[in-house]
Amino acid sequence: MAGLVPGAAGATSRGVPMGQRWQRVAAAAGLLSPSGDPQPTIFAQMSALANATGAINLGQGFPDTDGPDEVKDLVKRAIDDGRNQYPPATGVPALREAIAEHQGRRYGLALDPATQVIVSAGATEAIAAAVIALVEPGDEVITFEPYYDSYPAVIAMASGVHVAVPLTLRPARADEPGTDGALRFAIDFAALERAATARSRVLLLNSPHNPTGMVLTPDELMRLADFAARHDLLVITDEVYEHLVFGAAKHLPIASLPGMFERTLTVSSAGKTMSFTGWKVGWVTGPADLVGAVQTVRQFTTFAGGAPFQPAIAWGLGRDEFPAALAASLEHRRDVLSAGLQEAGFSVIEPDGTYFIVADGAPLGFADGDELARSLPALAGVAAIPVSALCRPGDSDGPFRSLLRFTFVKDETTIDEAVNRLIAARLGGRRR
Ligand code: PMP
Ligand code: GLN
C-alpha cells in the first residue's frame, strides 16, 4: 500500500520502540506507517471512509439483509432460557454434531463430533489458532496472492515466513460468463512448485477465494493435493464461502480427496453461510490430533463464546435452503454489478463464488488502485477495496495494482444506485 512500509528501527511517533511483535504483525499486513504507527485493516479503513463521506459501501463484505428470522428467534429464546454462561470450550454438542452432519451430508466426510470438530470465534480465530499451533519460527506458509488480510498477520504472530504465490489470469472458457476476451483468475502451478522449499510447512488455501471469487476446480484441487503430499505439507483450508458458488461451479473440500483428510484442517463459519457476520461463530474440522493442537491454543485465545448463538446455528446448518437461496440471489446481483461496472468503464474479472467481483481501473486511466479506492468515495460516492492491500506490502508494480474489489452482497436497489453513481462520475473523462 502506498506509503506503508515495514518499520525497522527507532521509535514510533508515540515513542514506542520499533521492532516489537505487534509491529511485525502490522507490517506483514501492510498496515505499519513509516513512522511505526499501525493502521486498522483495509476493511475498517474503507468502511470508516464510506461512513464519513456518505458513500455507498461496496468495500467491506457484509450483507445488508440479516439471515433467517427463525434463527434469530432461536437466539432470543436461548437468551431467555438462560443460555448465557460459558458454553463448553469446544462448542455446544448440538453445534458440533450439526457441523459433523453437514460435512457428512454434503461432502461425504465422516467426522467424530467429540474429537474432530471445534467451534471458534469466527473463522478468523480458527485460522489464527491453527497457524499459531502448527507453524514454528522460520517455517514457510504458502498462500496465493491476493490473500485474505488476516493470513500474513497470523503468520507473523507465529514468526513464520509468508510465501505468497501470485494467481495468474487465463482466458475464460466458452461455458463461463463474460464477453469475448474475458479473463479469469487461476493458479500458476509452475510458480507454486518454485515456491516450495525444505522449510515449507503449511499450504493455506482459500476457496471460494476472497477477493477474486475464484472457485478451485476438482482438477486444481487434485494438483494441490499432490503438491501437498509431495512436499509433506499441512493444509489449512478456509472455506467460509463454501455455499456461495454460482453457475456450474461446485465447492469441493480438499479434505475429501484421497489421502488428504489426515493432513488437512478445514475452516468455515456461519457468518457467510447464514448472513450473520457479526455473531462470529466459526469452526474447524479435521483429524483429532490436528484439531486437538488447534484447541490447545484456542482455549487460551477466547476459551469459549457465543453461547446463545450456537444452538441456533446448529438448527440453521441443517437447512441448506437458506444458503441455496442466498447463492441464487447473489449470482443475480453479481450479474447486475458486473454489467454496471463495465458500463462505467471498468473491465471485470468474473467470480464463480463469494460476495466479491474484481474490477480493473486501468481502462479508465487509473493505474493505482489504492489511490482510486481512496478517492472513489469523493469522486463517485462509492467505496471499494484496493486489491493491492491484499498483496505483499511495497510491491507497487505488482500485477494486481490497478484492481479494485467491489461487493455485491447488498440489496439490488443499493447496487443500482452505486452503478448509477459510478456511471455519472464519468471516471474515464477525469483522466483524459
Ligand atoms: N476468511 C475469509 C476468506 C473471509 O472472507 C472472512 C471474512 N468473512 C473470514 C475468513 C473471517 O470469517 P469470520 O467472520 O467468520 O471470522
Ligand atoms: N471478510 C470481510 C471482507 O472481506 C471483512 C471482515 C473484516 O472486516 N475483518 O470484506
Image: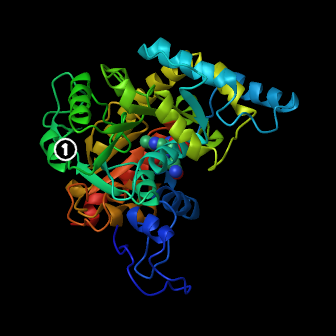
Residue 210 location, quadrant? top left
Q: Which residue lies furthest to the front in this view?
A: 289
Residue beneath the point at 51% across and 19% down: 111
Q: Quadrant of the N terminus?
A: bottom left
Residue beneath the point at 30% across and 39% down: 233
Residue 275 visible somewhere in the drawing: no
Residue beneath the point at 48% across and 86% down: 11
Relative to residue 380, is residue 247 depicted above or below? above
* 233 to the left or right of 108: left
Q: Is mark 1 on a helix, strand or loop?
A: helix
Relative to residue 106, is residue 342 depicted above or below? below
**Is 380 or 18 nearer to us in this picture?**
18
Where in the figure is residue 356, as x and y percent of width and height? 39, 41
Relative to residue 201, is residue 326 depicted above or below? above
* 216 to the left or right of 39: left
Q: In which quarter of the image is the C terminus?
A: bottom left
- Disc 1 target residue: 192
Task: Name which residue type carries label 1.
Answer: Leu
- Tell me if mark 1 has few (under 14), some (14-19) or many (20+) residues whose alpha carbon lies within 10 angstroms of its own: some
Residue 336 visible somewhere in the drawing: yes
